[in-house]
Every structure is written in structure tokens, then in C-alpha cells.
Image: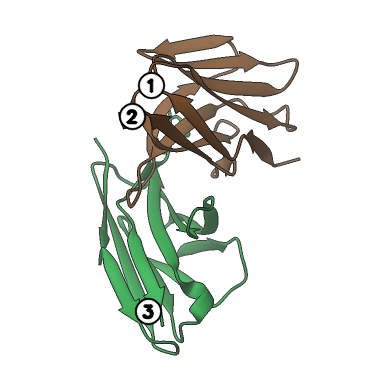
């Protein structure tokens, strides 16, 4: 019940296309859903996060869509660029909890 | 803003040798601190976390140990390295208290190769 399942494991998108990564969870007590971006050889960095009181959050080309009833959330990258090529991790936690539960990661490649 | 420092950046050690990786935090007091390991092309495995000085929780039984001798210092150790200890080690921190989100901020990582 503490797992977060992320898909796909890898994704190739053409430049200018839309990249979509999906995550699903079971624990309905989760109330914080961040996405992290990790470039090769670097530590992950927070990209965008959402709480379940909203269904969508947008920051520039990055959008989180949240479906509380389906217990799913997804990351959409509009107008994908080669510089977006990285590994993306979704995560979930309960406010005040000490740990994040991470998905397995998606390796995104944007072809020029 | 919070910053995590880790050193060394890369390390090559023989099997059976000891290990000490250090992590320090700037820009926040009394943070939660975390050690993760990431195998090549894989996800983030939480190894240890700490909510305060001397307080360590272990997530995975293994050849490693952690210590927190100061508020902003977190150390990962091993007495005898195994080949399976190779990986990318990440230290992370999180603010706690009123108004804090659950955001974790990560350090640059240490690439450990055990030969």
C-alpha cells in the first residue's frame, strides 16, 4: 500500500512533442505528490509538486494532472526539448511524514 | 535556500576496505536527513534517515551504517565494503516544522565503485 507505481520505464519523444509519465498509488492518505528531475551524474531536483485539493498545476511547460478518484497523477511536458532528456521520478507522502515514497523512475529521451 | 554538500564526488575502493561518506547541510536547522543509494539505471533506495542528532532509522539491513554527530552532518559508513555496495549515494534533507512541505532537496551524490 506504500508503493507508487510509475510508467513507462523509458520514453522516447520527438522534439516539440508531448511527454507523458504516469504514476499510481494505493494509500489514500497521501497528500503531497512531487516530481523530481535527475540528469546523469547529478542529484534529483524538485521539478513541480501538487496537493490533492487541485486537479492540475502548471509551471511553464510542465503540468501535473491529478485524479484523486483514480489515485493517479501524471507529468506532462509540452513542447519537449532535448534539454528535458533526464530521468523523472514521481513520489508521494503524507504531510508531516518523514519519508517520500518514490516511483521507479522514467528515463526520458527527446530526439532532436 | 538549503544546500547539501557531499564528498567525495567519486571514490574507488577495494573489497573489504572501510568507507566514510560525509554530507553537510546549509541554510536550515534541525532538518530531517536521508541517505539513498541508486544503482545504475535504477530507482532511489532509501538506506537511512535521521530526525535529529544521534537518531538513525535503518530502512534496509545491510553492510552499511549511518551516524549524525551534529545537526547538519550525516555520515554513511562501512567497516568492510562488498562489491554490491557499488552505486551512486545521495544525501537529502528536508525542512521540518510549521509551514514546511515534504520537499526533499538532494546533494550532488558520490559515485562509489568497489573493485
Q: Residues within 10 Å of mark 1 (few under 14, many from 20)?
A: some
Which quarter of the picture shows residue B62?
Answer: bottom right
Query: Is residue A95 placed above or below B11 in the rendered structure?
Result: above
Find the distance from the CA under tag 1 to the CA under tag 3: 43 Å
Find the distance from the CA under tag 2 to the CA under tag 1: 7 Å
Disc 1 vs disc 3: which is toward the camera?
A: 1
Query: SS class of the residue under badge 3?
Result: strand
Residue at coordinates 56% horizontally, 30% vertically from top-left? Answer: A95
Residue A84 visible in this rendered orientation of the protein: yes
| Residue B8 position within the rendered picture, expressed as x and y whole percent measured from the top left | 25, 67
| Residue A83 position within the rendered picture, expressed as x and y whole percent measured from the top left | 31, 30
Asked if the residues shown at circle 2 and circle 1 are in contact, with their CB atoms under 8 angstroms apart, the answer is: yes
Number of residue marks: 3
Chain letter, brown in picture:
A
Q: Do the dots labelled 1 and 3 sit on one chain?
A: no
Query: SS class of the residue under badge 2?
Result: helix
Tell me the chain of label 1. Answer: A
Residue at coordinates 70% horizontally, 31% vertically from top-left? Answer: A25
Q: Please indicate whether residue A54 sits to the left or right of residue A42 in the image.
A: right
Q: Which mark is residue A15?
A: 1
Which quarter of the picture shows residue A17?
Answer: top left
Query: SS class of the residue under badge 1?
Result: loop
In the figure, what tint was chain B given?
green
Q: Which residue is mark 2?
A: A82
Q: Which residue is mark 3?
A: B19
Tell me the chain of label 3. Answer: B
Residue B95 visible in this rendered orientation of the protein: no
Tell me the chain of label 2. Answer: A
Q: Nearer the viewer, residue B64 or B39?
A: B39
| Residue B100 position within the rendered picture, expressed as x and y whole percent measured from the top left | 42, 30
Amino acid at each position: 500500500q506504500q508503493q507508487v507505481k510509475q510508467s513507462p520505464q523509458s520514453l522516447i519523444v520527438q522534439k516539440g512533442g508531448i511527454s507523458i509519465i504516469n504514476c499510481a498509488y494505493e494509500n489514500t492518505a497521501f497528500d503531497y505528490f512531487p516530481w523530481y528531475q535527475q540528469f546523469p551524474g547529478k542529484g534529483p531536483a524538485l521539478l513541480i509538486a501538487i496537493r490533492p485539493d487541485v486537479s492540475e498545476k502548471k509551471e511553464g511547460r510542465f503540468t501535473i494532472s491529478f485524479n484523486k478518484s483514480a489515485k493517479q497523477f501524471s507529468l506532462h511536458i509540452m513542447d519537449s526539448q532535448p534539454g528535458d532528456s533526464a530521468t523523472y521520478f514521481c513520489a508521494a507522502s503524507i504531510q508531516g511524514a518523514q519519508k517520500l515514497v518514490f516511483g521507479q523512475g522514467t528515463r526520458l529521451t527527446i530526439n532532436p | 535556500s538549503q544546500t547539501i554538500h557531499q564528498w567525495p564526488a567519486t571514490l574507488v575502493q577495494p573489497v573489504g576496505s572501510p568507507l566514510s561518506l560525509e554530507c553537510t547541510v546549509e541554510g536550515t536547522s534541525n532538518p530531517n536527513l536521508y541517505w539513498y543509494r541508486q544503482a545504475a539505471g535504477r530507482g532511489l533506495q532509501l538506506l537511512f534517515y535521521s530526525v535529529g542528532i544521534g537518531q538513525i532509522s535503518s530502512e534496509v539491513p545491510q553492510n552499511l551504517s549511518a551516524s549524525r554527530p551534529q545537526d547538519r552532518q550525516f555520515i554513511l559508513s562501512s567497516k568492510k565494503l562488498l562489491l554490491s555496495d557499488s552505486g551512486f549515494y545521495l544525501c537529502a534533507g528536508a525542512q521540518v516544522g510549521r509551514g514546511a512541505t515534504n520537499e526533499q532537496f538532494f546533494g550532488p551524490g558520490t559515485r562509489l565503485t568497489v573493485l
